[in-house]
Image: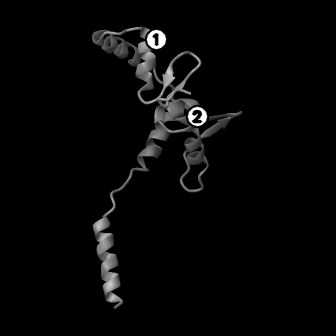
Amino acid sequence: MPTDGKRPTGNGATIGFAGYVIRIRQRCGSNDEAGKQRHEAECMISERPQPEWLDLKALTLYACVSERTLREWIHRSHNPLPATRVSTKILVRRSVFDAWLETHQVKPVDIGGIVEDLIAGVKGTN
């Protein structure tokens, strides 16, 4: 395994942070900056529609999470990620995933208020 933390794939591409750029550069063979930008735009912008149903492998790339995490989300007891099993394949509708993910936004926590409540509770017990 390479020391940079990226793992090679079977086709010579490297998967890692911004791995799509690495694959584009390998596939398009551009080395100058203008060529890189042109080829990245050509390769990243696709006129074909994206599939509505994603298998777990495609969803891991779309969501930037591991397959294990997706399986945990699908099988959780409270508010699971909606998925459909077709034979041995698990499929998730992209729009449903996006909507489900929007309901799980991180909310800010008022730590100052919590600390003040704790201090007030400790002072009140003396």
Q: Amino acid at mark 1?
A: Arg
Left or right: 25 as drawn, with respect to 75: left
Label 2 secondary element: helix
Residue receiving disc 2:
56
Coordinates of residue 12 in the picture (x, y in percent): 54, 16
Mark seen at residue 27: 1
Coordinates of residue 61 in the picture (x, y in percent): 50, 31
Closer to the N terminus: mark 1 or mark 2? 1
Tell which residue pokes out farthest to the right in this image.
87
Q: Nearer the viewer, residue 87 or 41?
A: 41
Which quadrant of the rendered structure holds the N terminus? top right
Q: Amino acid at mark 2?
A: Leu
In the rendered structure, are the residues bearing label 1 and label 2 in contact, judged by CB atoms less than 8 Å apart?
no
Mark seen at residue 59: none
| Residue drawn at 34 percent across, 77 percent down | 118
Which quadrant of the rendered structure holds the C terminus? bottom left
Report if residue 116 is visible in the image.
yes
| Residue drawn at 40 percent across, 21 percent down | 21
Tell me where residue 54 sits by quadrant: top right
Q: Nearer the viewer, residue 108 or 34?
A: 34
